[in-house]
Each structure stands twice: as structure tokens, then as C-alpha cells.
Amino acid sequence: VQLQASGGGLVQAGGSRRLSCAASGFNFRINTVDWYRQGPGKERELVASISSGHTTNYKDSVKGRFTISRDNVKRTLYLQMNSLKPEDTALYYCHLKLGIDYWGQGTQVTVSS
């Protein structure tokens, strides 16, 4: 299993960013995949998840601002982040639970005020 996240960077508050996660080594189409994040001095937390049937769930603080989506043909997970806030600053990870937890390497998003 490999999860390769990309798309992070420095963005001003109120701006947007789209993260991508390229997946390989498992049947992407039939599995729920997630985005987690870990901010400075904070625990890792679930941001959003999407099931094989495209059912989505979001952390309350990102509802209405973030959108998770997937392209099963490209085997890629996305996170569209709008109206970014400084408190969104974190290392963002894509995640898969397939018996055990698999994590991508993380991509840093820094939101400046």
C-alpha cells in the first residue's frame, strides 16, 4: 500500500488549496479513505472521510469549507480547502484502514493571518 499526498504549501487566510493523494497497492474503489491532520502541539485528528459509495463525513470545524472527493479511475483522493484559517495549519495525511492503519507521508499546509 502506498499513499502519496501532495498539494500543500503556504496560503493566506481566506485562501484555497487542493490536496491530492495518489493511492496504489490496494483496491482503491471499494475502500473508505480519509484525510487527517496534525497541527503544531496537537494530536492527529480526522478531517474528512469518503466511503466507496461516496458518502462523506467531516469534522465540524471544516464543514462548509472543505470538500473531500475521490476519482476511482485515477485512484486519487482529494481535499478541496476553501476559506482557510490559521487554525487549519497542519500536516495533512491521507489514511486507509485495511486491517491496519496506512498513512501517507503528509503534506504541510500553512495558513498565514
Image (cartoon, rainbow, N blue to C red):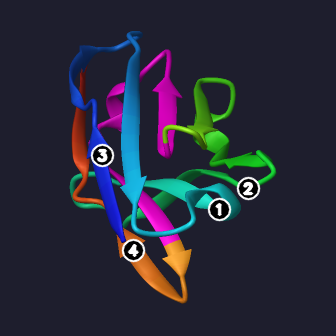
Choose mark 4 or mark 2, whichever is in front.
2
Q: Identify which amino acid the numbered label 4 is placed on.
A: Tyr
Q: CB of mark 2 within 8 Å of CB of mark 1?
A: yes
Q: Please tell me in which quadrant of the rendered image residue 72 appears.
A: top right
**In the image, residue 29 above or below residue 107:** below
Disc 1 to disc 4, how far (Cα)?
A: 12 Å
Q: Identify which amino acid the numbered label 2 is placed on.
A: Ser
Q: Is residue 91 visible?
A: no
Q: Residue at x 34, y 14 (%)?
A: 13
Q: CB of mark 1 within 8 Å of CB of mark 4?
A: no
Q: Tell me where the magenta segment starts and ends, as one range.
A: 75-96
| Residue 8 falls left or right of residue 50 | left
The residue that mark 3 highlights is 5
Q: CB of mark 3 within 8 Å of CB of mark 1?
A: no
Residue 40 image label: none
Q: Identify which amino acid the numbered label 3 is placed on.
A: Ala
* First in sequence: mark 1 vs mark 4: 1
Residue 66, x across and y down, in percent: 57, 29
Q: Residue at x 36, y 71 (%)?
A: 1
| Residue 93 falls left or right of residue 60 | left
The residue that mark 4 highlights is 102
Q: Please tell me in which quadrant of the rendered image residue 23 appears.
A: bottom left
Residue 32 image label: 1
* First in sequence: mark 4 vs mark 3: 3
Disc 3 to disc 2, how far (Cα)?
A: 19 Å
* First in sequence: mark 2 vs mark 1: 1
* First in sequence: mark 3 vs mark 1: 3
**In the image, residue 22 above or below residue 1:** above
Choose mark 3 or mark 2, whichever is in front.
2
The residue that mark 2 highlights is 52
